[in-house]
């Protein structure tokens, strides 16, 4: 229930609104590309089901599509089916939509293509999500107790805080032309999480990789087929050029 309530609050923020007051000023880190890493995608799917699917749906993704990342239907049934008992169902949120609407005025948004919907600041949607999920910090001035460097004044808590622990940002104050500026220098760990910093970054990379894959499960196949098509056309072009030269060489 605690995770559900936290995830409900999460739905009121970053995935609902694409605007971040001042968020564009924070540098986005480059997200690792793990759409070809089956182990990473499987771990990302596990994190998604446990921490996101409580409130957010992925209405355009069916559970049995996870066989594309190396899972069997039995593994899906045993480990990932919490909101349904049919492996052919779409990924629906565990929360009752009517209840969610009564609490928040709207249903939490669908996350099927969330990694494709947020781009800018010289980065991709995956870069934004990777940065956003790693830059939460404790802020007692906020109702939720949390704030975010990539999305300042965010209205949702840090649902992965048990994994990352509690951190606060460290700023360096400089005075230029009579005005004070605060420059972000790094992080100070207040309380440890279940994961080390490196392990947490790895987990977030896996989750973002899964969100990226879920937005277009056939993307890697499309790229492979595209490469072979281009190679075929290049080979055919050479062949056509030689045939054309052979045909016209005796024609004056």
Image: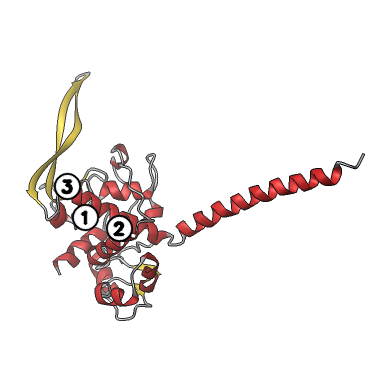
| Eye-nearest disc, 2 or 1 | 2
User: Of marks 3 and 2, which one's residue comes earlier in the chain?
Assistant: 2
Q: Nearer the viewer, residue 207 or 96?
A: 207
Residue 197, label in figure: 3
Q: Residue 67: horizontal and vertical position, in percent?
A: 38, 70
Q: How is the image coloured?
A: secondary structure
Q: Residue 140: horizontal and vertical position, in percent?
A: 10, 48
| Residue holding disc 2 | 40
| Eye-nearest disc, 3 or 2 | 2
Q: Residue 126: horizontal and vertical position, in percent?
A: 35, 50
Residue 156, label in figure: 1
Circle 2 Cα neighbour tier, 10 Å, few/some/many (<14 / 14–19 / ≥20): many
Asked whether, in this view, residue 5 is left or right of residue 44, the answer is left
In which quadrant is the N terminus drawn?
bottom left
Circle 3 Cα neighbour tier, 10 Å, few/some/many (<14 / 14–19 / ≥20): some
User: Of marks 2 and 1, which one's residue comes earlier in the chain?
Assistant: 2
Q: Residue at x 12, y 45 (%)?
A: 167
| Residue 115 picture quarter | bottom left
Q: Nearer the viewer, residue 170 or 38?
A: 38
Return the residue found at the far left: 191
| Residue 69 picture quarter | bottom left
Return the residue found at the far top: 177
Asked whether, in this view, residue 28 is left or right of residue 225, the answer is left
Q: Residue at x 26, y 74 (%)?
A: 96
> What's the distance in space between the residues labelled 3 and 1, CA to CA?
22 Å
| Residue 41 picture quarter | bottom left
């Amino acid at each position: 229930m605690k995770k559900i309530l936290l995830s409900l609050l999460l739905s009121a923020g970053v995935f609902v609104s694409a605007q971040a007051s001042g968020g564009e000023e924070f540098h986005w880190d480059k997200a690792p590309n793990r759409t070809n890493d089956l182990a990473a995608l499987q771990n990302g799917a596990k994190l998604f089901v446990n921490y996101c699917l409580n409130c957010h749906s992925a209405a355009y993704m069916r559970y049995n599509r996870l066989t594309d990342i190396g899972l069997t239907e039995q593994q899906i049934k045993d480990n990932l089916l919490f909101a349904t008992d049919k492996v052919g169902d779409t990924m629906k949120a565990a929360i009752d939509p009517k209840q969610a609407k009564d609490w928040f005025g709207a249903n939490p948004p669908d996350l099927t293509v969330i990694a494709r919907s947020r781009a800018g600041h010289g980065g991709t949607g995956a870069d934004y999500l990777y940065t956003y999920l790693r830059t939460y910090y404790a802020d007692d001035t906020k109702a939720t107790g949390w704030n975010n460097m990539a999305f300042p004044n965010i209205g949702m808590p840090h649902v992965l805080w048990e994994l990352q622990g509690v951190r606060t940002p460290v700023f360096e104050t400089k005075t230029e032309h009579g005005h004070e500026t605060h420059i972000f220098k790094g992080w100070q760990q207040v309380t440890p999480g279940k994961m080390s910093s490196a392990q947490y970054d790895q987990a977030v990379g896996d989750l973002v990789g899964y969100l990226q894959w879920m937005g277009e499960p056939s993307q890697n196949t499309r790229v492979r087929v595209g490469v072979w098509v281009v190679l075929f056309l290049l080979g055919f072009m050479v062949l056509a050029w030689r045939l054309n030269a052979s045909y016209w060489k005796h024609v004056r």
